[in-house]
Image (tube, helix red, strand yellow):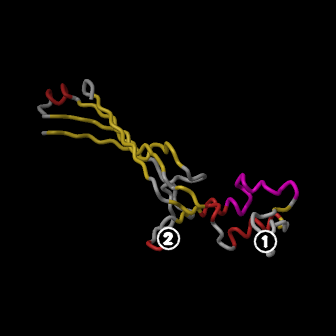
Amino acid sequence: NYRGISMSFLIDFKLGHNLISGTHTNAWRHGQDIKTLEGRDVGYVVGDGVSMDGSENTAQAPIQPYYETVRAHQISEQSVFNAGSWQLRQITVGYSFTSLANSLGLRGLRFNAVANNVAVLKSWVPHIHPDQNGIYSDRRQGLESTGLPVTTGIGFNLNIQL
């Protein structure tokens, strides 16, 4: 507070949980993730792993079916991310109209502007807001798929003390 002007902000964080991103899995399937550039120059991918005899895998998989298989068979390892984040949740700026309140016979008159979901300061999930989740179910916690975007809200309030 300074001369009737006040400002406050809220920063919160969430740590220690993972998210499986369906949005990222679809980007992988359709070649829209940077990691799907592997093999495009030669037309095939050699997957990590070993052959039946224990030797290093050398099997060449055609590029398109290789990345399509990820989504079709619900392989999601590449789409599991640390879902933690640091966010600027709220900023409030206000002003107390002390002299106006006194002239109107009021005990107080205050106006505030409030912004919610202002900014993501740090996130480990690519492509989406870390709080975006399209599936709300006890059985599917941590699974993101085509959710509505997280919105920023701006509001105003007037506090009149009689």
Relative to 15, residue 93 above or below: above
Give the residue type that dot 1 points to: Gly
Relative to 33, residue 144 above or below: below
Q: Locate the C terminus by quadrant.
A: top left
| C-alpha separation, residue under disc 1 versus residue under disc 2 | 36 Å
Between 32 and 44, which is closer to the camera in this rendering? 44
Asked if residue 55 lies left or right of residue 112, the reply is: right
Q: Position of residue 106 (x, y in %)?
A: 13, 34
User: What residue sits right under mark 2 in the picture?
Assistant: 140
**Magenta-span inclusion, residue 12:** no
Asked if residue 154 lies left or right of residue 76, the reply is: left
Relative to 26, residue 115 above or below: above
Binning the other alpha carbons within 10 Å of mark 1 as few (below 14), some (14 to 19) or many (20 upward) gives few
Q: Position of residue 122 (x, y in %)?
A: 51, 44
Q: Residue at x 47, y 67 (%)?
A: 141
Dot 1: element: loop
> Where residue 54 is drawn, which disc sits there?
1
Asked if residue 34 lies left or right of residue 14, the reply is: right
In magenta, the rendered stretch is 27-42
Image quadrant assignment for residue 100: top left
> Where residue 70 is drawn, which disc sits there?
none
Image quadrant assignment for residue 56: bottom right
Q: Residue at x 36, y 44 (%)?
A: 155
Ranked by sequence position, the earlier of labels 1 and 2 is 1
Image quadrant assignment for residue 39: bottom right
